């Protein structure tokens, strides 16, 4: 491998400076789950609640990021690994910038989620498992992809002919079959309050 002559350069303004200015504790809300499980729906609703209370947020969504930064990547295992590696790095930068970052990617492999967690930092990484059984995702099939995957028109589709490794110890475990979107959002907001990421005296019920 070619020798890399690069040296880390400390910045004048630090992460703590930015946190003080923004008056918040940054973190990543890392949503993981099957296609159609509810990642985007819940992440958007959580972001809306935080935004309405003047929290500075940024939502990275699989479909959207694959239109730009990651448009060179497909769905082979190696592409998914690179997809999640880049998202981990981008999340780290956004947390450094002081934001509450929400990521909504299938992120099917445990080892890649673990790498993202160690990149961002353990106390700033909140893994949220959107646990929706395959049968329900398939029934929803809002994009018609499951039907195509079953017919063989789409190859390597997660849950059909590409694996999804469930998180073993997610910080938040949400079952959308048992909770409405609103209830799922409350579970997440309550966790953020309980662990001091956002303050309690702000009414997030609105
Ligand atoms: N083969 C295959 N497998 C899974 N998903 C597929 C595939 N092809 C296209 N799509 C669409 O791409 C979205 C998933 O992209 P991600 O970046 O989240 O995937 S991954 O984390 O790299 O596995 C996913 O979006 P969501 O439904 O929002 O999860 C699908 O709409
Ligand atoms: N409790 C729930 N939580 C999240 N989504 C739900 C729930 N119940 C039904 N849905 C529906 O399931 C679909 C989930 O799609 P989406 O959010 O795009 O999933 P993903 O981003 O994981 O692919 C949406 O049409 C949403 O309205």
Image (cartoon, rainbow, N blue to C red):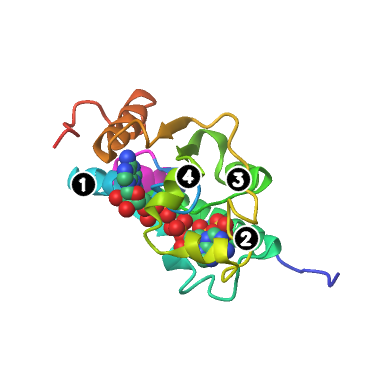
Marks 3 and 1 close (CB-CB < 8 Å): no
Query: From the Cβ of disc 2, is ligand 1 less than 8 Å away?
Result: yes
Q: Earlier in the sequence, mark 3 or mark 1?
A: 1
- Residues in magenta, as a range: 16-25
Question: Which residue corresponds to mark 4?
Answer: 135
Question: Which residue corresponds to mark 2?
Answer: 80
Numbered disc 2: secondary structure: helix
Q: Earlier in the sequence, mark 2 or mark 4?
A: 2
Q: Earlier in the sequence, mark 4 or mark 3?
A: 3
Viewer-nearest of discs 3 and 2: 2
Q: Earlier in the sequence, mark 2 or mark 1?
A: 1
Neighbourhood count class around disc 4 (C-alpha, 10 Å): few under 14, some 14–19, many 20 upward: few
Q: Earlier in the sequence, mark 3 or mark 2?
A: 2
Marks 2 and 1 close (CB-CB < 8 Å): no
Q: CA distance from mark 2 to mark 1?
A: 33 Å
Q: Earlier in the sequence, mark 1 or mark 4?
A: 1
User: 21 and 181: which one is in front?
Assistant: 181
Q: CA distance from mark 4 to mark 3?
A: 24 Å
- Can see residue 9? no
Q: CA distance from mark 3 to mark 1?
A: 29 Å
Residue 98, horizontal then vertical, whole percent: 39, 48
User: 114 and 160: which one is in front?
Assistant: 160
Question: Which residue corresponds to mark 3?
Answer: 113
Q: Residue at x 33, y 30 (%)?
A: 187
Viewer-nearest of discs 2 and 4: 4
Viewer-nearest of discs 2 and 1: 2
Question: Which residue corresponds to mark 1?
Answer: 54
Q: Main secondary structure of the magenta part?
A: helix
On screen, residue 146 above or below 57: below
On screen, residue 148 above or below 204: below
Q: CA distance from mark 3 to mark 2?
A: 11 Å
């Amino acid at each position: 491998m070619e020798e890399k002559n690069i040296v880390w350069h400390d910045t004048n303004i630090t992460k703590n400076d930015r946190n003080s200015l923004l008056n918040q504790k940054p973190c990543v809300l890392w949503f993981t789950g099957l296609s159609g499980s509810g990642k985007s729906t819940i992440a958007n609703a959580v972001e809306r609640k935080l935004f309405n209370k003047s929290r500075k947020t940024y939502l990275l969504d699989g479909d959207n990021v694959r239109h730009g930064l990651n448009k060179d990547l497909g769905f082979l295992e190696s592409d998914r690994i690179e997809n999640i590696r880049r998202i981990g790095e981008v999340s780290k930068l956004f947390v450094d910038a002081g934001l509450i970052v929400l990521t909504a990617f299938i992120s099917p492999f445990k080892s890649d989620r673990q790498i993202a967690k160690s990149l961002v930092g353990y106390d700033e990484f909140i893994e949220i498992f959107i646990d929706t059984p395959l049968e329900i995702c398939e029934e929803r099939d809002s994009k018609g992809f499951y039907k195509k995957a079953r017919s063989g028109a789409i190859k390597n589709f997660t849950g059909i002919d590409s694996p999804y490794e469930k998180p073993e110890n997610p910080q938040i475990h949400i079952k959308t079959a048992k909770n409405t979107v609103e209830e799922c959002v409350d579970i997440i907001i309550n966790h953020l309050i309980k662990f001091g990421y956002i303050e309690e005296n702000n009414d997030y019920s609105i």
